[in-house]
Amino acid sequence: MSLDNLPVEWSVTGLESLSEFIIGGDWGKDLSFADESYIDAFCIRGSEFKNWKTDKGKTAVPRKLKISSLNTRRLKVGDILVEISGGGPDQPVGRTVYIEELVFNNLDSEDIVCTNFLRLFRPISSINAKYLNFYLSFFYKTPEIVNYQSGSNNLRNLQFKDYLKLEIPMAPLAEQQEIVRQLDMMLAQVEQIKARLDVIPAILKKFRQSVLADAVSGKLINQDFSSLGFLKLESLILDSGNGLSKRKGDSGNEVTVLRLADFKDAQRVFGNERSILLTEKELLKYKLLQNDILVVRVNGSVDIAGKFILHKDNEKDEAYCDHFIRLRIDQQKLLPEYLLYIANEGSGRDYLVNSLSTSAGQNTINQASIKGLQLRVPEIKYQDMIIQTVEKLFKHSFKIEETVLSAQKRVNLLTQSILAKAFSGELTAEWREQHQDLITGVNSAEALLAKIQEEREASKPVKKVKKVK
């Protein structure tokens, strides 16, 4: 963000000039450590920053700190904690937390400190500390934050000495207070909108599960399938087989061999396929036909292992790897789409999950377990009616979900947009016109910076004069 076009009543200063106190964290000693000069305290860690508003203090670590150290490190209202280590490729460091109150979840003690992954920044009393934190939070989401970092993609560090040189747009104190007031109100409304949007995907997921439950019971089309007897899936399978285990071939034609990476949420994705040479005999054995079903044979996630995926014709020969089991269903008796409703939800899915065997962190299902799945099979005409109805309802739900996701993206950008308006002066432009007496003369930003400088000079320790012998 450029600071070249700020309101004429504003000024600019370095972050370090706004500090009353800056100090790093301290892990302290284990609770078993015995020393009268140490006292119990709680350490706030960087890992708590992501969900601070709801989880603050929940995972604070009890430690023992020197009493003399605690007196200086103890958090106070108005302090700002800055994350200086951690992060990753999609998570730069530099997040901040403003200590608005000393009420931490599950903590009885007022002796709260930060650990060595954080810096405690205590703003000078002449400014509005929350105003400063709002700006640092805004800056953290700008591309410029990477200029203050070092380290690898897996572990980033904030170059704090450089970070302290960060230029801060300095509004007059009265305007800082007005900006904070407006931001508190507007961002609270944004959070309410986000909270309402965030629950909708879960509601839609529950709706789809309810639709599928009604589908396989017959309720969805005003039928009752409870009188139908159960059949084993084995009696409805024409052919089945595990996938291709080899990863390269020496002869034959180039054929795409599908992997789990070629599917997302059970839907085919394109652009990262792998092909190997297959002989005619191999292709005959492993070739997929339209409406074949692929079952995930092995995966580290219980949520994925045993899932059924419907293969659609891709107008070219494709095979499948040994992470799958292929099922070819007797479509005169059972429609593949209807089988997916049974296998991927409700009691059918429960059966398949319970059939998984686990070894070395991998969950595996075999053909015998899959063929043991029991299901009620209504007439084809009813299956077709159910499929048509489910697809129609799902189409509406997915359209709503796309709209919600689009709205969530816009709302996520809204906070940054509001903050940008706040620190360019646009948010309070009308307020400034109406309150010139509060932002000029002794109330101006320049006068405020002069007062800050005086406070900093007054707080410096007096140097002792050596006596001349």
Image (cartoon, rainbow, N blue to C red):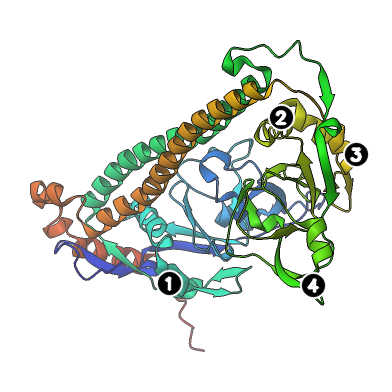
Q: CA distance from mark 1 to mark 2?
A: 79 Å
Looking at the image, is mark 1 or mark 3 nearer the viewer? Answer: 3
- What amino acid is found at the position of numbered circle 2 in the picture? Ile
Of mark 1 and mark 4, the one earlier in the sequence is 4
Q: Are marks 3 and 4 in contact (CB under 8 Å)?
A: no
Q: Residues within 10 Å of mark 3 (few under 14, many from 20)?
A: few
Q: CA distance from mark 1 to mark 3?
A: 84 Å
Q: Are marks 1 and 3 in contact (CB under 8 Å)?
A: no
Q: Can you see residue 258?
A: no
Of mark 4 and mark 2, the one earlier in the sequence is 4
Residue of label 4: 248
Q: Residues within 10 Å of mark 4 (few under 14, many from 20)?
A: few
- Most foreground residue, 394 or 103: 394
Furthest-bottom residue in this view: 469
Q: Are marks 2 and 3 in contact (CB under 8 Å)?
A: no
- Residue 136 rendering spot, x and y as whole percentages: 40, 59
Q: Is residue 292 left or right of residue 235?
A: left
Q: CA distance from mark 4 to mark 2?
A: 36 Å
- What amino acid is found at the position of numbered circle 4 in the picture? Lys
Residue of label 2: 342
- What amino acid is found at the position of numbered circle 3 in the picture? Ala
- Residue 96 rendering spot, x and y as whole percentages: 48, 55
Q: Is residue 69 left or right of residue 135?
A: right
Of mark 2 and mark 3, the one earlier in the sequence is 2
Q: Is residue 206 left or right of residue 277?
A: left
Of mark 1 and mark 3, the one earlier in the sequence is 3
Residue of label 3: 368
Residue 462 - label: 1
Q: CA distance from mark 1 to mark 4?
A: 77 Å
Task: Give the image quarter of residue 46.
Answer: bottom right
